[in-house]
Image (cartoon, rainbow, N blue to C red):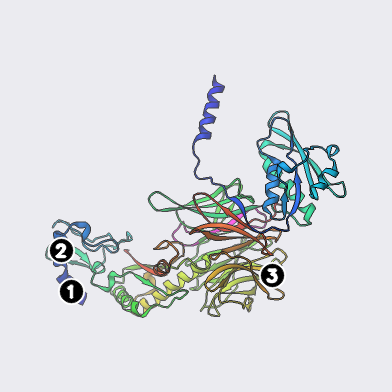
């Protein structure tokens, strides 16, 4: 009796509508001709059925990367779950180079054993195979891990399916006022959690290199101030609330410092804040101009930033210790919001052409600029930690959405969320 | 001083107008200046459009009919205009707004106990962080003009909301022109 009552309560709780936990969904919007065909056989199930469809998550991860074209389920000739059941001749007919099989078993519906094997169909050999024990709650992230292994085995690059995205949503209340939320989701947009909710705008989330903390700008005190928040505990700390602007935080690669924009001395300048000591050092000295949007080069010694010291916004580079800044962008009259690839060779930025704002990349060695997007209200480029894709904010039918484009411009995705405007994306580092 | 005389002259007329027309046809939105009030209602109208608090020390003019208001609320005064607009990516105050700002500067100089909050805003184009800085620069160029009239630096609070609080939603030239602005908000002390 009591037990039934508990069940009822649990059911009622499940039915109560939770505040907007909308899910970002990825839609491939542009070209992936070069996608590699791969056969992903639905994983076999023994005992309790798992709450997550592991092979489906892997398949959707690989497809969303634009680099793989999973075969349609109806085209799969057979459904092997173990290596000895595979007839390589069959799979060669399908022109699929890779074949992924596996199975999931559970005796109690709480703990699951998952195993997978990835084969090279033409060589008729196993490339990689692993077995895991996870609780039901770990199945989804295990699926992303397996997708990462498959991706890395077949492309030679690290996969980013286990990484996360931070972004800001804006929703309108019935009375016309707005509410804002800083959210973190899995890389595929699933599993969003709210890090901070506010009636005031939130801007510029920046991931600490350990992936455990976010720095961001909040207007909760009616002006821009910078906070650092630990994701696991939710604990937050105000780190810059000087007179004037406190904005554009960027973590140093060693995680010990934040570059910031402060206007406490009357003009927006770049500063470096050492987090442990609270010591502040000023990097730029240009009282006539806006200096903002710092980002660290991976070497930790230099900072890229936006400045209009030459009349229009352009990207400059300066030593983190200060000194003379050198101009980096020369093409076009508007270049801003730089981000740098993990290898330090490619810079992404917002680049205006005829008054339209696109995402472009610049080779820092040669200076060559390539415009990657056709969308026209692009903002906030953020590199994936493997340097392969660039996540950014744009507009669709007047509403903020996220999009991603590969650095070669060939693969394009859109990440939409129902019911709210989404912006200010930041791609997390790899999990450590 | 001229404003005071003008105000005393205009006020009774406005009171009449307010009595003869339906309330919602009086002043609309924006800087609501005069309301239909009973003769015993006195005090400062603290109902600026933005919910700003005029403060007890603002200059008060009492009209013959018992209405009390202050110079800031006189719609015929340049002080009633509390928003100035800017060109794209510019922090230069337009010549047509100079008179408004000179009047506010002189008013602040005359009323050293008043503070004003200068809120800088931009249109949505370009990066949010750059716009935050641009909004601040607009507020600072407004402050500079006000200070040239004798207002002192501690009479100001400068804030920028960048593109985060548009006055007009949408992505039209019109919306953009309305959003590139500095708002002056008086605060009592």
- Sequence order check: which comes first, mark 2 or mark 1? 1
Please give the residue where the numbered disc 3 appears in the rendered image: A301
Please give the residue where the numbered disc 1 appears in the rendered image: B6
Residue shown at the point (39%, 48%) measured from the top left? A174
Q: Which residue lies furthest to the left in this view?
A: B64
Q: Where is residue A169 in the image (x, y as percent from the top left)?
A: 51, 53
Q: Could you tell me if residue A350 is visible in this image? A: yes
Q: Are there few (<14), some (14-19), or many (20+) residues within 10 Å of tag 2? A: some
Q: Which of A316 and A389 is in front in this view?
A: A389
Residue shown at the point (81%, 47%) measured from the top left? A93
Q: Nearer the viewer, residue A266 or A395?
A: A395
Q: Quadrant of the C terminus of chain B?
A: bottom left
Q: Where is residue A320 in the image (x, y as percent from the top left)?
A: 65, 71
Q: Are marks 1 and 3 on the same chain?
A: no
In the picture shown, does residue A400 fall above or below A316? above
Q: For the residue labelled by badge 3, is the local secondary structure a helix, a strand or a loop?
A: loop
Q: Could you tell me if residue A226 is visible in this image? A: no
Identify the subunit bearing mark 2: B
Residue shown at the point (49%, 52%) measured from the top left? A420
Q: For the residue labelled by badge 1, is the local secondary structure a helix, a strand or a loop?
A: helix
Q: Which label number is shown at residue B17?
A: 2
Q: What stretch is highlighted in magenta?
A: A208-224
Q: Where is residue A141 in the image (x, y as percent from the top left)?
A: 68, 44
């Amino acid at each position: 009796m009591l037990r039934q009552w508990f069940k009822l309560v649990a059911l009622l709780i499940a039915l109560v509508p939770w505040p907007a936990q909308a899910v970002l969904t990825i839609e491939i919007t542009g070209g992936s001709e070069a996608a590699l065909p791969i056969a992903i056989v639905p994983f076999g199930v023994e005992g309790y059925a798992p709450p997550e469809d592991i092979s489906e998550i892997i398949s959707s991860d690989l497809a969303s990367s634009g680099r793989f074209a999973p075969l349609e389920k109806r085209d799969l000739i057979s459904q092997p779950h173990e290596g000895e059941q595979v007839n390589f001749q069959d799979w060669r007919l399908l022109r699929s180079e890779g074949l992924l099989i596996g199975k999931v078993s559970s005796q109690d519906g709480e703990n699951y054993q998952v195993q997978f094997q990835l084969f090279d169909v033409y060589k008729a050999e196993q490339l990689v195979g692993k077995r895991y024990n996870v609780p039901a709650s770990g199945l989804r992230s295990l699926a992303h891990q397996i997708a990462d292994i498959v991706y890395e085995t077949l492309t030679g690059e690290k996969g980013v399916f286990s990484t996360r995205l931070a972004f800001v949503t804006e929703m309108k209340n019935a009375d016309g006022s707005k509410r804002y939320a800083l959210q973190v989701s899995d890389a595929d947009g699933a599993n969003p959690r709210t890090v901070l909710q506010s009636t005031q705008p939130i801007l510029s989330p920046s991931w600490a290199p350990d992936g455990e903390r976010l720095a961001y700008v909040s207007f909760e005190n009616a002006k821009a101030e910078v906070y650092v928040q630990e994701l696991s505990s939710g604990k937050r700390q105000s780190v810059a609330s000087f007179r004037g602007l406190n904005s554009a935080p960027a973590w140093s690669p060693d995680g010990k410092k934040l570059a910031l924009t402060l206007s406490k001395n009357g003009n927006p300048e770049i500063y470096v804040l050492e987090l442990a000591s609270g010591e502040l050092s000023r990097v730029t000295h240009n009282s006539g101009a806006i200096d903002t949007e710092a980002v660290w080069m991976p070497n930790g010694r230099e900072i890229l930033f936006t400045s209009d010291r030459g009349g229009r916004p352009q990207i400059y580079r300066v030593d983190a210790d200060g000194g003379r800044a050198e101009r980096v962008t020369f093409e076009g009259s508007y270049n801003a919001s730089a981000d740098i690839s993990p290898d330090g060779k490619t810079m992404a930025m917002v680049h205006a052409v005829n008054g339209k704002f696109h995402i472009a990349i610049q080779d820092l060695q040669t200076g060559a600029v390539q415009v990657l997007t056709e969308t026209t209200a692009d903002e906030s480029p953020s590199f994936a930690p493997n340097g392969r894709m660039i996540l950014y904010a744009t507009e669709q039918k007047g509403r903020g959405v996220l999009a991603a484009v590969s650095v070669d411009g060939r693969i394009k995705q859109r990440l939409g969320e129902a019911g709210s405007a989404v912006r200010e994306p930041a791609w997390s580092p790899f999990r450590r | 001083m001229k404003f005071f005389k003008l105000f005393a002259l205009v006020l009774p007329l406005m009171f009449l107008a307010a009595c003869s027309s339906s309330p919602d046809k009086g002043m609309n939105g924006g800087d609501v200046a005069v309301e239909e009030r009973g003769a015993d209602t006195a005090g400062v109208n603290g109902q600026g459009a933005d919910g700003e608090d005029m403060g007890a020390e603002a200059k008060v003019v009492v009209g013959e009919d018992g209405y009390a208001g202050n110079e800031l609320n006189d719609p015929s005064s340049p002080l009633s205009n509390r928003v100035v607009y800017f060109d794209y990516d510019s922090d230069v105050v337009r010549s047509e707004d100079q008179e408004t700002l000179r009047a506010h500067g002189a008013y602040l100089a005359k009323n050293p106990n008043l503070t004003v909050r200068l809120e800088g805003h931009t249109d949505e184009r370009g990066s949010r962080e750059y716009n935050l800085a641009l909004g601040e620069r607009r507020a600072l160029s407004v402050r500079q003009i006000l200070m040239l009239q004798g207002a002192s630096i501690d009479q100001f609070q400068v804030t920028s909301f960048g593109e985060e609080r548009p006055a007009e939603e949408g992505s039209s030239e019109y919306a953009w022109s309305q959003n590139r602005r500095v708002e002056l908000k008086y605060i009592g002390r």
